[in-house]
Amino acid sequence: MRSFAPFAMALALAACSSVPPRPVAADAESLPQRLVDAPSAARRDELIRTAIAALLERRYAEAERDAVTALAIDPRAPRALAVRGMAVLQRARRTEPPDLQLAEAGETDAVLAAQLAPADAFVGWLHAALLAETGHLSAAAAAADAALERCAAAPPAERAALLGIAGTYRYELGEERAALPLLQAYTGLRPGDATAHYRIGACLLRIAQVPTGPRGPLVAQQQAEAAAAAFERSVQLAPQDLDAALAIGTAWLRAAELAGERKDDAVRDRHRAAAVQLYQRLAAEWPQAAEPCFRLGIAAEAALDRPAARAAYAAALERDAEHLGALLNLANLALADDDRSSAAGLLQRALAVPAERSDLRDAERKRIAERLRNLTVR
């Protein structure tokens, strides 16, 4: 990392020596206007370029230094303000608890930058990202959406960045219907992002869980099929992502379920077979992973093939003796066969799974314990 030049250090200290206005009171009209000649403008622009490069590489001290030096030339340079804002926020977060005054100074810079350049996609992107990093995810999503409306003419690369965070924030907020078109537009500009394709698949699959309208089951089936395609694209880009590969099968099983509801048995069986074939391949390719075997059990249960389901869950437990889903599902099958002893043993094992490996809530744990007591009462 380059060391601070004395002049840049002095500027950085001066920038934070007074109490800045709070973000809600920020007013770009209060910033000084300075005539900038051509050589100075060229120097300012070069500093902003190096500041942005440093910020994107998380070299925040360098980014802040170059942004501060650019602002000494032109206090109304929006991108320099935006970069300084994010860099100052990162400095505020070095302490625990974070320095609130510094954090507000960073947010104020971002607000000022957005006021000065409302149609600058990079400024809008940094403003939204800063809000997200301060824990204001809803505000970040709204800021990204608003910036997209203002920045329709932005260069594709900068618009893609805005679409990416806008879609991501809506996705993280659980707003799949809002996230989906944003993520689809983003991958149209940046098709090589495996995570974005996975999120598209997840959005489609979640939407497909709740069919609506008279054509609901058919539309939901098509959404589940599209989800499978999105997950497949994610796996093409990230072949070692087992979760994405497993999600393909989940989407096929949901499509099969919906086809069954529509009495389209041929499509149901074709999709179910595709899921089974996928899980079998994954089980072979990932010999230490229990999840493909567990998913095979789910597919077998969906097909009402209890012997195959039991075998698959048992195979999952051979690979991972603490696989909670396999333990509980196998216990349910044992109960269906009136094998109380086996069911009790499996429930005991489920309750013994360490907390760090179990996603059981207290209420679920209590229900399992109650079932176990009922099984063991003589």
Image: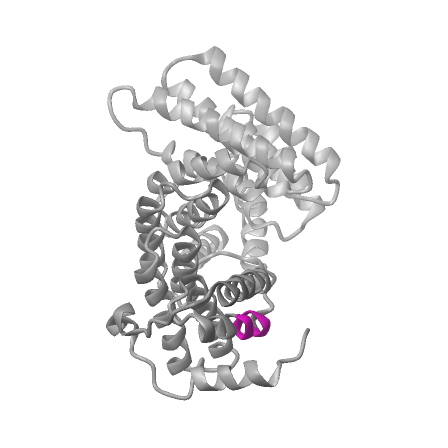
Which quadrant of the view contains residue 342?
Answer: top right
Question: Residue at image x 48%, y 54%?
Answer: 372
Residue 304 drawn at (x, y percent):
51, 25
Q: Is residue 80 visible?
A: yes
Whether residue 13 sits left or right of residue 114 in the image: it is: right
Main SS category, magenta section: helix
Is 357 above or below relative to 222? Answer: below
Residue 24 drawn at (x, y percent):
25, 71
> Which is nearer the eye, 250 or 3?
3
What scheme was used to colour the molecule?
one colour
Is 231 above or below relative to 138? Answer: above
Q: Is residue 190 magenta?
A: no
Q: Is residue 301 visible?
A: no
Question: Residue at image x 49%, y 33%?
Answer: 188
Whether residue 41 sits left or right of residue 131 in the image: it is: right
> Which is nearer the eye, 20 or 369?
20
Q: Is residue 65 magenta?
A: yes
Quarter occupied by the N terminus: bottom right
Residue 32 drawn at (x, y percent):
33, 75
Which quadrant of the view contains residue 97?
Answer: bottom left
Question: Residue at image x 58%, y 26%?
Answer: 275
Which region is colored magenta?
61-66
> Which is nearer the eye, 273 or 33?
33
Residue 113 drawn at (x, y percent):
36, 64
Which quadrant of the view contains residue 180?
Answer: top left
> Which is nearer the eye, 68 or 180?
68
Q: Residue furthest bottom?
A: 17
Is 354 above or below relative to 89? Answer: above
